[in-house]
Amino acid sequence: MNPWRNKILAVLVVSVFLFNIIPVVSSAAKGGTSPNPASIVGKGTYGSRVFTQIISLLEGDNIQLALRVFFMVWVTKSMDAFAEDIENNLSKYILLNPDLRNPGSLNLLRYFVSLLYPVYILAIIVSGFYIIFIPGSPLGRSRAKSLLSKLVISMVLVSFSSEIMGMLLYLTEQSTVEIIGDEYNPSAYASIVALEFSSIVYCVRNLVLLVNIPNAFLAGGGTIMAFFGGILNPHGFMYEFGHAMHAIELIEVETVWCTPLILLVILMLIGVHGLLSIRYFMVLLWAMLMPFTIFFSSFEFTRGIGRSMIEQTLLWSSLQVFYGVTIVLIAVGITIVPPSMYNSYGIGLHKNDIPYVGAAMDKLDVRGDLFISIFSFTSMFLLFLGPLLMFTFFQKLLPP
Amino acid sequence: MLAAASMAVFVCAADTPGEAFSKNFPTAVVYITKRILYYNIASGYATRGVDILSDNLADFILMNPSPKDPMVLDLTRFFVSLLQPFYLLAISITGFYLLLVSSSPAGRNKAKSTLIKLVISLVLISLSPQIMSIALDITENITSSVLGQADIAYYSYALNRVIDGLRSLHKWSCLISIEMGYYTFLPLFFVVWGTYLMLLLRFFAVVLWIILLPLSIFLYSFTFTKNIGRNMLEQTILWSSMQILNAVVVAVAAIGMMFKPPGFMNIEFMFLEFDFLYFVGAFSLVLSPALMLMWFRNFLP
């Protein structure tokens, strides 16, 4: 930590100590003969009461109320942003492949290719020397000839590695477009799934707000009553009732209790944004390593590594198509489930089951329900399981 | 705050407003101060050393133990001295078989090839520090040249940007609830400490495999123990070459982050901006060892 931060921390620690001592000292000093500044301020006047109530807003309950309101606003804004992002961009994120023609990629590719050229040239020279000058067995000479032709073909393929990878990505992208439509005209399947996932996010938002609103209303009402009650009559009913409203523990819900709900949304973000970002990077990585993939696949001794690299290249590129198939699977699954089953099993409540809440939500045009069906929940997990299943089942897809 | 606290002590005899001030202001300040304190301590702990990491990332990636370090050399020689009697015994038995036992030509050929393998293997284990030294020089040079093509400065910038975003998230979570701050502490912690852990884990793993190289060669030389020896040699090669993969991952992550389409995987709300691609890019060095060990297996004959 830097020295300034240490100093600030030291001041804060001392202040905490001091402020904890003040109430003790003040209660001791109260009985003494210290001057009474109330006589200077004007005890009992409206001015001093307003000033007092403004300072009273700093009490712990009001700070908690302010933080709770901030939490509700934060959750609302963030969930709205996530939901809109998923609704508008799900197809785009699945379809997007890294551009291999940008200067950075081309630079790195050319560098890797330039590393391999000398190896190829040396191998071609040695094979050529063996064929021309060394009198070997016919089997040895035919092996040397086939090696020479493999080297030449391999060298040509390495030179075109970015175009080969580009073609592969074009193929997977077009296959996925056939399944889920393009980013401007997504198919019905993609739209259904995007709406389903965004509705999960809206549901979580609504549930978090629902559990916090009663407390916020009570605390807010209590603050307002205590504030104005304190101005009108510091020991009156309004003032005392305002404080009592803060003390109602019956529906006290800590903000941190909403964490499991927020974790649902975080899981979805990992499944959609996280895995698709990882795929984007992996495709770029394997595109950059394509020259080495071709090189290692060309020789008997390194064929094992080469085969693993080809498999990974194909799997990560094809993950796009697999995501498209997963999207169709989710859309069909959700569509054919009987509504009675869909609405019976899940997390949360149906908004129309709570008096006035459903009507209020409809009137305020609040998006989403308060109920997350187990089918939606499971479809979210398919986003994780899909890639895992693909990599498990198609691990050794190439022949040895 | 100290001055305000002192004033509050002397005004506290009043009913209001001084009493209100002395009752409420300390509570509010303590409430907020606790959270700010926790945020500062937790985020300071989680991001300890991030400046050193981002300024010296290339050095951390290029870091290799020296096989010729006296301590490492002592341990390597210990293993060599442990194995040399086995070799001498095996060579003696094979030589005895060849010279004095009359057997079939196939048996004699097999014994001859075994003798040659034993001698080569013995020479190799005696030269294992030099072999490892050459191997690490090669990987270091390749890594250095790959890092020369990578925009490490951009990677460090992206790492710091991700850390700042996570710190902001952690700060506001702590203000709302300290318990919520526990959860937002974790991604911050894993990005920084995870990167350090993986880079240093590689260093220690390479030390281990340098010391065990004589044993790996010994086990690989005999048919009976070839599988174990092969696995050990593969691990030696993988952990040494992980340096190259780290450099490639940094280069690719920097390119991916720099040339990503605008708005891709980017979500903004209130005063926070969250870029998933940058987060995954910053996390890539944490994941690279696992990827390498997963992808490259059973590649030796």
Image (tube, rainbow, N blue to C red):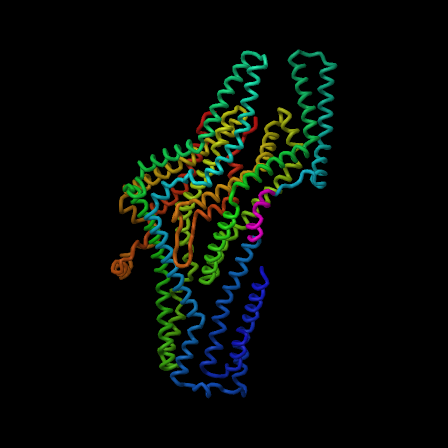
Is residue B105 shown left or right of residue B193? right
Q: x, y percentage for residue B88?
A: 73, 25
The image shows residue A7, relative to residue A340, as above or below, that is: below
Is residue B263 shown left or right of residue B53? left
Residue A382 visible in rendering: yes
Q: x, y percentage for residue A36?
A: 49, 87
- Closer to the camera in the image, A105 or A326: A105
Reply yes or no: does residue A197 show up in magenta. no
Give the residues in magenta: B50-62
Q: Quadrant of the C terminus of chain B?
A: top right
Q: x, y percentage for residue A187?
A: 28, 41
Is residue B242 shown left or right of residue A42? right
The image shows residue A213, relative to residue B226, as above or below, that is: below
- Closer to the camera in the image, A59 or A3: A3
Quarter of image, res A386: top left
Reply yes or no: does residue B53 show up in magenta. yes
Q: Which residue: 40% across, 34% down?
A: A166
